[in-house]
Image: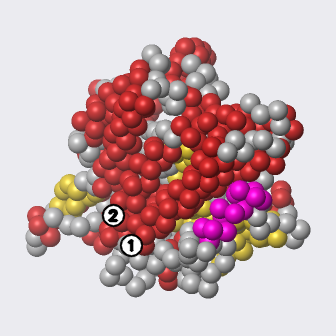
Amino acid sequence: MLRHNAVAILASPSLGAQRSLSSLSSPVASPIFQYRWLRIPCCAVKKTRSNTSRSFSRLLVDTRSTTIASAYVGGGNGCSIIGRCWRAIQTQSSDGINTIKSNHPGLFTIPGLDQPSDFLRLASKASSKCNSLRSALSSSLDNETTANTASAAIETLHILDDISNEICSVIDAAELCRSAHASAKWRDAANDAFGILSDYIAELNGDIILYRALVTVTTSPYFAQMTEEEQRVAVLLQHEFERDGIHLPFEERERVREVIGHVTQLEGLFNQNITNGRKLFDVDSSRVEAVVPKHILIDHVPQSEESKRFGSSKVTVSTDAHIANSLLKYSADPILRREVYMEVNTACPQNLDVLDGLVAQRHDLATMLGFSSYAERFLQDKMARNPQNVFIFLDQMRQRCERRYKADMEMLATAKAQIEGVGSGPIEAWDVPFYTGALKAKKSGQDGDINEVGGHFTVENCLEGMKVLVRDLFGIRMVEKELSAGERWDLADDATDTYQPIRKFEFLHDEEGPLGTLYLDLHPREGKYAHAAHFTVRCGRKIQDSGEYQLPIVALVCNLSPAYANVGSNFLLSHSECETLYHEFGHALHSLLSR
């Protein structure tokens, strides 16, 4: 069966990529990949993460819905052409990225991914395998055998699927690694591999041979004999090729490819700046201690020389989400809230130039492909279809919400006047989390925790809830497994342990057997993607030649309240953090259960 999750390629904001906000105080990026195709043109970024050109994979085959990214196709190996190519490739190496079994699992349990330099080796190997498949497809096209029989047409589709899977299996692992690994060496190596494969995907997306082979399938008299799933994959892939200008003359296609490369680089730079854009600033310790104890800040935030000076009244605070959001939500000091808000929102000034460049390059890309704007190009195959429908929807939503919005703002303004005084002014952006929380606390009759059931929101209780959900809804057992040292990514080069270890769960069904692996990377650390997202490390797919099923591997990356050494996983989460965790878990279920 053809299937895959998706590679993000649209703009980041991931990745991913391609992202939702779960609450005012807790922004969560949610790059969900629903289909996985390399639309042969699969070149993009997630972090989602960056999404621009990963189309080759855009072929989907399941009924899942696309998200912020393009999907790639993932399919199986056919019998003749595909089978021969696959066997020929496997004789070249036994440690390929898609090996089903291995006694020496590496990072993310990927065989052969044991050290940073392995990323470039695996990227090279994947490209080589894809080139072998492309050569086989080119030969069959020359011999007019790509769709001269029903089985040949299906095999051609499977070859395209195999190409997608080879590249996606490496680039998706690189995407997670560069976004979340504690080691800068690993992140840099993954980023290099990601860039190389993004360029290769752009080459695939502009490969006229692949497109011609696909057209022989969709125009074949045998097309009507294909399954609905196979027809869907073929049609969507062809549309993706054509949307990205495969019909253009060679020189124009090359220009499109060049611009796509620029867009991808800018998207990646935007996300990288956000991940690395941690800002440190000093405040009076008395102003923050009511929310975050000073010793906690000293233990987890590098202190300035001023704050370390004996007798200093200062403490250094960071723009890390878990610290900044806590201060915005729980501090009664409006001056502190404003300072934190401004520091957080000015932590990446370099991204202003990046965004200017990205807007310009995206517009150039869209007009080169015959669209009036990037929005028109992006929405063409989405549910909204065009920018006009988006404007209409937003305007209707504004009208429907206006009365309630004004009422809520009046409530917040009244609360602010009562606490800060009549002349405190209007509600500002940095006031919303605090006064929203205060009103909720008052409504629930509580002086402390604003959540009526907040005391139940520990990580362990949330995980138990997940187990109950999948057991009762799907008959699935969610079993925690011990991680090997090689598959972890939460340790820096010189570290030996961590208070917030990665957790690993296998999904098992009594009749279906193993369904896949879920990693949970729940707490913040230096160098880690600062929001929340679902990453597909490897897509599930049936391998036609062997009949085996490649089990999916997914990871949920969050930045929940830190589980400090003396608290462990019993640290209380806010209601919004609990929502975020279950939201991302839903994306993981899509990837794990769709077949």
- The percent position of residue 239, horizontal first and vertical second, equals 62, 30
Give the farthest residue toward the front.
Answer: 143
Discs 1, 2 touching: Cβ within 8 Å: yes
Of residues 523 and 537, the one drawn nearer to the viewer in this rendering: 537
Where, by quadrant of the figure, is residue 78 drawn?
bottom right
Q: Which residues are magenta?
A: 73-90
What quarter of the picture does the C terminus occupy? bottom right
Q: Residue at x 59, y 33 (%)?
A: 240
Q: Residues within 10 Å of mark 2 (few under 14, many from 20)?
A: some
Residue beneath disc 2? 188
Q: Nearer the viewer, residue 382 or 134?
A: 134
| Residue for point 58% across, 42% down | 210
Q: Amino acid at mark 2?
A: Asp
Q: Position of residue 420 (x, y in %)?
A: 33, 36
Tell me, for residue 375, which label it has, or none. none
- The numbered mark, 1 or 2, whose residue comes first in the sequence reads 1
Amino acid carrying label 1: it is Pro
Question: What residue is disc 1 on?
Answer: 116
